[in-house]
Image: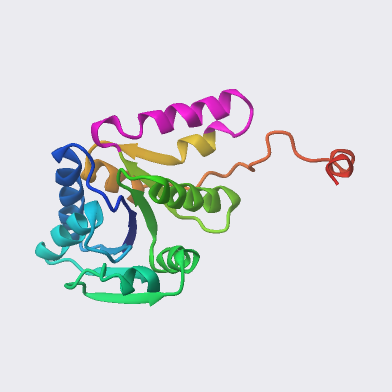
Amino acid sequence: MKSIAVFSGSNAGVSPAYREAAAALGREIARRQLTLVYGGTHMGLMGVLADAALEAGGVVIGIITERLHGRGHLHPGLSRHEIVGHMRERKARMAELSDAFVALPGGLGTLEELFEAATLTQLGDHKKACGALNVRGFYDPMRAMLTHAVQEGFMKAEHRDMMVIAAQPGELLDALANWQAPTVDKWITPPTPETQKKED
Protein backbone atom coordinates (compact mmCIF):
# COMPACT_ATOMS: atom_id res chain seq x y z
CA MET A 1 0.00 0.00 0.00
CA LYS A 2 1.66 3.19 -1.22
CA SER A 3 -1.26 5.60 -1.55
CA ILE A 4 -4.61 6.02 0.09
CA ALA A 5 -7.73 7.93 -0.90
CA VAL A 6 -9.59 9.60 1.93
CA PHE A 7 -13.22 10.66 1.63
CA SER A 8 -14.40 13.17 4.22
CA GLY A 9 -16.88 15.87 5.02
CA SER A 10 -16.51 19.40 3.70
CA ASN A 11 -18.02 20.43 7.04
CA ALA A 12 -16.27 19.93 10.36
CA GLY A 13 -19.02 18.38 12.49
CA VAL A 14 -20.30 19.36 15.91
CA SER A 15 -17.41 18.04 18.01
CA PRO A 16 -13.70 18.96 18.09
CA ALA A 17 -13.09 15.20 18.10
CA TYR A 18 -13.79 15.10 14.36
CA ARG A 19 -11.11 17.68 13.56
CA GLU A 20 -8.67 15.97 15.92
CA ALA A 21 -9.26 12.60 14.24
CA ALA A 22 -8.84 14.06 10.74
CA ALA A 23 -5.55 15.67 11.76
CA ALA A 24 -4.35 12.46 13.43
CA LEU A 25 -5.14 10.47 10.28
CA GLY A 26 -3.28 12.99 8.10
CA ARG A 27 -0.22 12.83 10.33
CA GLU A 28 -0.27 9.03 10.43
CA ILE A 29 -0.54 8.77 6.64
CA ALA A 30 2.46 11.09 6.30
CA ARG A 31 4.42 9.23 8.98
CA ARG A 32 3.99 6.00 7.05
CA GLN A 33 5.15 7.75 3.86
CA LEU A 34 1.86 7.03 2.13
CA THR A 35 0.60 9.45 -0.51
CA LEU A 36 -2.69 11.04 0.48
CA VAL A 37 -5.24 11.43 -2.33
CA TYR A 38 -8.32 13.46 -1.47
CA GLY A 39 -10.86 15.92 -2.85
CA GLY A 40 -8.50 18.87 -3.06
CA THR A 41 -10.33 21.51 -1.00
CA HIS A 42 -9.44 23.48 2.12
CA MET A 43 -12.97 23.09 3.51
CA GLY A 44 -14.05 21.21 6.64
CA LEU A 45 -12.38 17.94 7.59
CA MET A 46 -10.85 17.76 4.12
CA GLY A 47 -8.76 20.85 4.84
CA VAL A 48 -7.82 19.67 8.32
CA LEU A 49 -6.68 16.32 6.91
CA ALA A 50 -4.57 17.89 4.16
CA ASP A 51 -3.04 20.51 6.46
CA ALA A 52 -1.94 17.86 8.96
CA ALA A 53 -0.42 15.59 6.32
CA LEU A 54 1.45 18.48 4.68
CA GLU A 55 2.73 19.82 8.01
CA ALA A 56 4.06 16.32 8.77
CA GLY A 57 5.99 16.29 5.48
CA GLY A 58 3.58 14.12 3.53
CA VAL A 59 2.72 14.11 -0.16
CA VAL A 60 -0.85 15.25 -0.78
CA ILE A 61 -2.62 15.08 -4.15
CA GLY A 62 -5.93 16.87 -4.55
CA ILE A 63 -8.51 16.01 -7.19
CA ILE A 64 -11.03 18.83 -7.52
CA THR A 65 -13.91 19.52 -9.87
CA GLU A 66 -14.03 22.54 -12.15
CA ARG A 67 -17.04 23.88 -10.26
CA LEU A 68 -15.36 23.73 -6.86
CA HIS A 69 -12.13 25.11 -8.27
CA GLY A 70 -14.07 27.99 -9.78
CA ARG A 71 -15.51 28.78 -6.35
CA GLY A 72 -12.02 29.12 -4.90
CA HIS A 73 -12.12 25.89 -2.86
CA LEU A 74 -8.70 24.53 -3.94
CA HIS A 75 -6.25 24.03 -1.08
CA PRO A 76 -3.30 26.34 -1.84
CA GLY A 77 -0.49 24.19 -0.45
CA LEU A 78 -0.90 20.79 -2.10
CA SER A 79 1.97 18.75 -3.48
CA ARG A 80 -0.03 18.39 -6.68
CA HIS A 81 -3.58 18.87 -7.86
CA GLU A 82 -5.73 17.94 -10.83
CA ILE A 83 -8.88 19.67 -12.04
CA VAL A 84 -11.54 17.35 -13.47
CA GLY A 85 -14.88 18.00 -15.10
CA HIS A 86 -17.31 16.44 -12.65
CA MET A 87 -17.75 14.28 -9.57
CA ARG A 88 -17.78 10.95 -11.40
CA GLU A 89 -14.44 11.79 -12.99
CA ARG A 90 -13.12 12.93 -9.63
CA LYS A 91 -13.99 9.60 -7.98
CA ALA A 92 -12.56 7.59 -10.86
CA ARG A 93 -9.28 9.51 -10.78
CA MET A 94 -8.97 9.16 -7.01
CA ALA A 95 -9.49 5.41 -7.39
CA GLU A 96 -6.84 5.21 -10.11
CA LEU A 97 -4.28 6.94 -7.90
CA SER A 98 -5.00 4.98 -4.72
CA ASP A 99 -4.34 1.52 -3.31
CA ALA A 100 -7.01 1.72 -0.58
CA PHE A 101 -9.88 3.92 0.61
CA VAL A 102 -10.77 5.46 3.97
CA ALA A 103 -13.83 7.46 4.96
CA LEU A 104 -13.77 9.99 7.74
CA PRO A 105 -17.15 11.12 9.06
CA GLY A 106 -19.13 13.05 6.48
CA GLY A 107 -22.42 13.48 4.70
CA LEU A 108 -24.02 12.13 1.53
CA GLY A 109 -20.94 12.54 -0.66
CA THR A 110 -18.64 10.79 1.79
CA LEU A 111 -21.01 7.87 2.27
CA GLU A 112 -21.67 7.55 -1.46
CA GLU A 113 -17.94 7.51 -2.24
CA LEU A 114 -17.24 4.87 0.39
CA PHE A 115 -20.05 2.60 -0.77
CA GLU A 116 -19.11 2.95 -4.42
CA ALA A 117 -15.53 1.93 -3.66
CA ALA A 118 -16.74 -1.02 -1.55
CA THR A 119 -19.19 -2.08 -4.26
CA LEU A 120 -16.41 -2.15 -6.85
CA THR A 121 -14.40 -4.33 -4.49
CA GLN A 122 -17.40 -6.64 -3.97
CA LEU A 123 -17.87 -6.96 -7.75
CA GLY A 124 -14.17 -7.59 -8.33
CA ASP A 125 -13.67 -4.49 -10.47
CA HIS A 126 -10.73 -3.75 -8.20
CA LYS A 127 -9.16 -5.44 -5.18
CA LYS A 128 -8.70 -2.49 -2.86
CA ALA A 129 -9.43 -2.29 0.84
CA CYS A 130 -12.11 0.07 2.13
CA GLY A 131 -12.34 1.36 5.68
CA ALA A 132 -13.91 3.95 7.93
CA LEU A 133 -12.47 5.88 10.86
CA ASN A 134 -15.13 5.43 13.52
CA VAL A 135 -14.89 8.72 15.40
CA ARG A 136 -17.44 9.08 18.23
CA GLY A 137 -19.12 5.91 16.99
CA PHE A 138 -20.09 7.70 13.78
CA TYR A 139 -20.05 4.50 11.72
CA ASP A 140 -21.80 2.25 14.27
CA PRO A 141 -25.16 2.74 12.50
CA MET A 142 -23.55 1.79 9.18
CA ARG A 143 -22.16 -1.39 10.68
CA ALA A 144 -25.62 -2.18 12.08
CA MET A 145 -27.22 -1.51 8.67
CA LEU A 146 -24.78 -3.85 6.93
CA THR A 147 -25.50 -6.56 9.50
CA HIS A 148 -29.22 -6.03 8.92
CA ALA A 149 -28.65 -6.47 5.16
CA VAL A 150 -26.88 -9.77 5.85
CA GLN A 151 -29.68 -10.96 8.15
CA GLU A 152 -32.30 -10.06 5.55
CA GLY A 153 -30.51 -12.00 2.81
CA PHE A 154 -29.23 -9.13 0.67
CA MET A 155 -25.49 -9.59 1.13
CA LYS A 156 -22.99 -12.09 2.44
CA ALA A 157 -21.26 -11.71 5.78
CA GLU A 158 -17.90 -11.74 3.99
CA HIS A 159 -18.87 -8.58 2.12
CA ARG A 160 -20.03 -6.90 5.31
CA ASP A 161 -16.79 -7.85 7.01
CA MET A 162 -14.57 -6.63 4.18
CA MET A 163 -15.33 -3.07 5.35
CA VAL A 164 -12.65 -2.24 7.92
CA ILE A 165 -13.99 -0.08 10.75
CA ALA A 166 -11.65 1.17 13.48
CA ALA A 167 -11.54 4.03 15.96
CA GLN A 168 -7.81 4.86 15.73
CA PRO A 169 -5.87 5.87 12.59
CA GLY A 170 -2.96 3.50 13.25
CA GLU A 171 -5.25 0.54 13.87
CA LEU A 172 -7.21 1.34 10.71
CA LEU A 173 -4.16 1.70 8.47
CA ASP A 174 -2.61 -1.51 9.86
CA ALA A 175 -5.82 -3.40 9.05
CA LEU A 176 -5.98 -1.95 5.54
CA ALA A 177 -2.34 -2.90 4.90
CA ASN A 178 -3.06 -6.52 5.92
CA TRP A 179 -6.45 -6.76 4.23
CA GLN A 180 -7.29 -9.64 1.90
CA ALA A 181 -10.06 -9.45 -0.71
CA PRO A 182 -13.04 -11.78 -0.09
CA THR A 183 -13.11 -14.79 -2.38
CA VAL A 184 -16.86 -15.42 -2.36
CA ASP A 185 -19.26 -14.50 -5.14
CA LYS A 186 -21.79 -11.76 -4.37
CA TRP A 187 -24.77 -14.00 -5.24
CA ILE A 188 -26.46 -15.60 -2.25
CA THR A 189 -28.51 -17.78 -4.60
CA PRO A 190 -26.75 -17.94 -7.97
CA PRO A 191 -29.04 -16.98 -10.84
CA THR A 192 -30.30 -19.81 -13.03
CA PRO A 193 -31.57 -19.60 -16.62
CA GLU A 194 -35.12 -19.86 -15.24
CA THR A 195 -34.78 -17.00 -12.78
CA GLN A 196 -32.99 -14.91 -15.36
CA LYS A 197 -35.93 -15.36 -17.75
CA LYS A 198 -38.34 -14.15 -15.07
CA GLU A 199 -36.20 -11.06 -14.44
CA ASP A 200 -36.03 -10.32 -18.17
Q: Where does residue 142 sit, x and y in percent of width and height? A: 42, 33
Q: In this view, does 118 lie to the left or right of 28?
A: right
Q: Where does residue 176 sit, x and y in percent of width and height? A: 35, 48
Q: Nearer the viewer, residue 121 or 182?
A: 121
Q: Nearer the viewer, residue 92 or 178?
A: 92
Please say whether residue 51 is one of the residues in the magenta stretch. Answer: no
Regarding residue 86, the answer to whether it shows in the image is yes
Q: How many labels, in total?
A: 0
Q: Where does residue 24 sit, x and y in percent of width and height? A: 16, 48
Q: Choose top left, top right, bottom left or bottom right for residue 64.
A: bottom left
Q: In this view, does 191 lie to the left or right of 111?
A: right
Please say whether residue 153 is one of the residues in the magenta stretch. Answer: yes
Q: Is residue 22 left or right of residue 120?
A: left
56 lies above or below 76: above
Regarding residue 1, the answer to whether it shows in the image is no
Please report the residue visible at 14 percent of the width from the left and 58 percent of the height from the top. 52
Q: Give the range drawn in magenta.
A: 134-157
Q: Nearer the viewer, residue 75 or 37?
A: 75
Please report the residue visible at 50 percent of the width from the left and 51 percent of the height from the top. 116
Q: Where does residue 74 sit, x and y in percent of width and height? A: 26, 70
Q: Choose top left, top right, bottom left or bottom right for residue 26.
A: bottom left
Colour treatment of the image: rainbow
Please report the residue visible at 45 percent of the width from the left and 55 percent of the height from the top. 128
User: Where does the N terminus fall, quadrant-wise?
Assistant: bottom left
Q: Nearer the viewer, residue 96 or 81?
A: 81
Q: Is the magenta stretch mostly helix, strand or loop?
A: helix
